[in-house]
Amino acid sequence: MSTNAIHTQANIYQSKTAPALLETNAVVKAYGDVHALAGIDVTINSGEIVAIMGPSGSGKSTLLHVLSGILLPDSGSVRLGGDELTSLSDADRSRLRRTHFGFVFQDGQLVPELTARENVALPLLLNGASRNKAIAQAEEWLTRMGVGDQAKKRPGQMSGGQAQRVAIARALVHEPDVVFADEPTGALDQATGHETMQVLTSTCAKRGMTLVVITHDVKVAGWCRRLIEIRDGLIHTDRSISTPENR
């Protein structure tokens, strides 16, 4: 491994004070003849709450996967805090996702056999925390999310809204720099989705976490302060937004 590569990894893994600045430059990602991303340039600043919108097949989910290091672009660069992610190995990108990123998915993706507090404790345990410390922090975050009374229940014993709050607690428990939320209200009714976005955006804003929300729903996007619209693998619109939800 080169000296530059070692320096890059040290910056990413050891400096939690570095700005969580995400940048892409001329990013291209194709599936066969279809260009999901056709040369994307985007910068997301530390602490921003951003919605990425677009119709099905527009490339928005692919952009999330590239930004988070799940997928590598075919060409172009992706940087976190000025450090290149595309040069890291699969194992190093996995470690980066465990330490610096949090994820909220449409269906929560909680482990059904585990209790709420065990689900939330997972990221801490994977990062080497003791079980007692991980469980204690998990219970604190469940309380913050308003579901402390669900700590010993399994996902199948909770409502959809409760389970999604547990999923948010799991995404935030290790205090990530960036939280990626992929259609976080897609499996919820309108009222529960409203509550979910309120707790997700307010908690990230309060704790200075960058939030990137993938959605096709303009009401969900209204909880964010910046809107990036993707069409045919390109940025169509990138603007600040102000709605009653995000004031």
Image (tube, grey):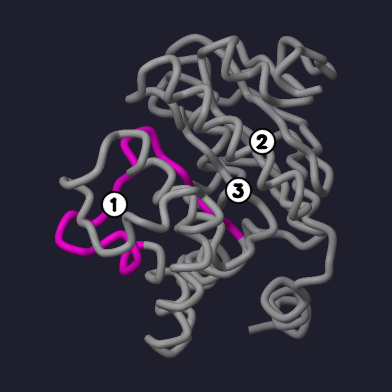
Q: Earlier in the sequence, mark 3 or mark 2?
A: 2
Q: Which mark is residue 110?
A: 1
Residue 2 lies in quadrant: bottom right
Q: Residues within 10 Å of mark 2 (few under 14, many from 20)?
A: many
Q: Amino acid at mark 3?
A: Val
Q: Position of residue 132 (x, y in %)?
A: 40, 87
* Disc 2 element: strand
Q: Position of residue 215 (x, y in %)?
A: 52, 21
Residue at image mark 2 = 27
Identified at 33% across, 25% down, the residue is: 187
Identified at 30% across, 46% down, the residue is: 109
Q: Earlier in the sequence, mark 1 or mark 3?
A: 1
- Going by the image, does 94 lie left or right of 177? left
- Going by the image, does 24 lie left or right of 122? right
Residue 225, compared with residue 84, is above or below; it is above
Camera-side residue of 63 and 167: 167
* Disc 3 element: strand
Camera-side residue of 105 and 81: 105
Q: Amino acid at mark 1?
A: Leu
Residue at image mark 3 = 179
Q: Amino acid at mark 2?
A: Val
Please tell me whether residue 111 belongs to the stretch shown in magenta.
yes
Please tell me whether residue 149 belongs to the stretch shown in magenta.
no
Q: Residues within 10 Å of mark 3 (few under 14, many from 20)?
A: many
Name the front one of labels 3 and 2. 3
State the separation of the CA atoms marked 3 and 2. Answer: 21 Å
**Residues shaded magenta:** 101-119
